[in-house]
Amino acid sequence: MDSKTRFFERKQRELGIALNDTQKQAVLQTEGAVLLLASPGSGKTTTMIMRIGYLIEEKGVRPARIKAVTFSRASAHDMKERYRRFFPELAPVDFSTIHSLAYEVVREHFRRAGVAYQMIEGGGDAGPDGGEDPDQAPLHKKAILRQIFKSVTGENMTDDQMDELTTYISYIKNKLLPPERWGTVKAGVTEAERILREYEAFKRSRPDKLLLDFDDMLTLGNEILERDAFLLETYQRRYDYVLTDESQDTSLVQHAIIEKLVRGHGNLCVVADDDQSIYSWRGAEPAYLLNFRQVYPQAQILFMEQNYRSVPAIVDAANQFIRRNPNRYDKNMFTERPEEEKGGIILRSFPDYKAQTKYVIGEIQKTERLSEVAVLYRNNSSSVALINALDRAGIPFYMKDTDNRFFSHWVVEDILNFMRMTFTDKRPDILEKIHLKFNGYISKQQMAAVKEIRNNESVFDNLLQYVKLQDYQLKPLQASRDTFREMKGMPPLQAIRVIRERLGYGKALDKMCEWMGFRKEFLIGILNTLEEIAETLETMEDFARRLKVLESALTSSKKRRGEHAVTLSTFHSAKGLEFEKVFMIDLVDGVIPSSEDIKKHAVGEDAPMEEAVRLFYVGMTRAKRELELLTYQERDGEKTAESRFVSHVRSIVRPESDKAAAAGAGHSADALALAAGDAVRHRVFGRGEVRARHGDLVDIAFAEGTKTLSLHTCVEMGLLEREACE
């Protein structure tokens, strides 16, 4: 028996781990570059740790000569713990994030060069010796950006704009874009490019030190390794073997650092799954994996396709679903779990959003092991109405990516201020916060004038009696005053609807979205969620208290990780997790895929739609036994369309439904056979061209935009026909 066989047999006895043939190959292929494409649930972490153990125990590599780079601190910690459990007698291996590695390079370079620097993520001052100066007042990136934004735009920055701006900056840094190309990147913030230039200038403005932020660690680390030959050689000689995990989430600058690190020996193991690359908005480069051999021509590419997590029905459906993406490695995920295992995929459609929530709560109440249940959604805004329902039902929950910003969002604060005005209209400080957001047309100068009047009378009466107004303002102001007085004591749901409609807050939001680039559907979603929270409450005081209760429940949910609680998570944050039962909710077009994904797809920009497919796939593959895909036909009085991804999954798991639709439509055989590129004519929308087909649903580009239509319905009603070729 050779040493390789003895190693695997010994580990099976000690740990109870039996690797499959591909996993063993990944462990044994220690020299040169290896790309290990690991499907969901294929045991990649176990394989990586076994590979490290094999290098040390069988090949005699010192643990300090091995570097393992992960995507996040949590991953680094998990791998370190797994290694310690598998090989308790061995010395530690260097597990770290790529940012940590880059920071180490930067710190060492500046120490040798005698350059002082200060971190502006909230740390203190670091001098040439890398030490912290406790007397140095910390600088905060967000505070600096808010100040620059205010000086450039004259406005205060919202949390949404801060998210957009910091994502824009990180994207540019991770893509290694030179300053002349910053303007080519779309940003959802006014003057983003100018703000970035002023921010970079600010960081260079101190004569005594450099100012650096988190993103600078990567770009500077890469630049230093490029020009500091001594330091590059130091790091190259430090490690003989490098492993990177979750490499589908790695950006261009991160890949560049790793390339330099392994240039001497070439011993690199990259573990990734191009089908789970869901962070392009952060600068991730999934195409890098597809072109891996351009960088490492002799690389071995191994496919870990066996899924140990999920029942066959889920594995087979997910495997077929992801194939709708053309730009990927052709993998064939499979499982050897028995076909007769209970579980699988259930698709449910509800009349409206509320029915979906009621169903989810009812199903969770039947569950004994809450820790084995997850509810996944694309947007964090989906979670607030859900936690409201869970809290009312007394169901404990753990929120994977807690986001309390909903409760401090300016839209929520606006609604509360409108309600405060119904208790007393004698407070100009409250009016000042909302005066530009309803039908009063009050200017800033008029607002300043009414603030000077201190007679403890109605701010509306003071405006009408003592402030110079334009003729067109009189009736709207009188009507607004009367509306606020009518609202006194009104139930909160009715009050919110009056605020949105009669007082004109809905239209004000529309204008703000046009002027400031806010995402309208996101803001409307906040208002809709507030209505759902208000629905069963009697007074506005009850409503304000309920928001506080939910905010507190959300905060305390952080402590329930690993406890008897259902997990709530976005699709993004669920990656790497697994549960016996998974509900994927809000599966409607406009959410997943998003409206923006659909628009770009309609004009031939396919990358966002492909990423949305990968995101849906990540959600599907979290389920071990039961996966429920939930959609609805209406939300807040507006019709919704089932997500095209749900339609595709239905055509996979219930192909007979497509056949039944074809048979029921009678003369529709030709229409149902439509394919991309076919010309059609719709009775309402006119001439169009088929872009894609998903079961019964078809994407058709018309002059007014792309529509997703049901073929069965269109043919049954005589709305759609194929156009003859000229």
Image: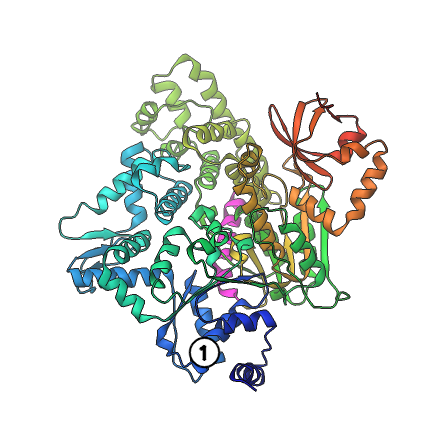
Q: Label the magenta part by its dominant secondary structure.
A: helix
The x and y percentages for residue 316 are 69, 57
The x and y percentages for residue 549 are 51, 53
The x and y percentages for residue 277 are 51, 53
Q: Is residue 26 left or right of residue 242?
A: right
Q: Which residues are magenta?
A: 538-561
- Whether residue 624 is situated above or below residue 659 in the rendered picture: below
The residue that label 1 is drawn on is 84
- Whether residue 312 is situated above or below residue 529 in the rendered picture: below
Q: How many numbered markers are drawn?
A: 1
Say which residue appears at 31% left-offset and 32% top-offset. 153
The x and y percentages for residue 373 are 63, 62
Say which residue appears at 66% left-offset and 26% top-offset. 688
Farthest front residue? 298
Q: Is residue 236 visible?
A: yes
Closest to the observer, 430 or 121: 121
- Whether residue 161 is situated above or below residue 561 in the rendered picture: above
Q: Amino acid at mark 1?
A: Arg
Closest to the observer, 231 or 566: 231
Q: Quadrant of the C terminus?
A: top right
Q: Secondary structure at mark 1?
A: helix
Q: Quadrant of the N terminus?
A: bottom right
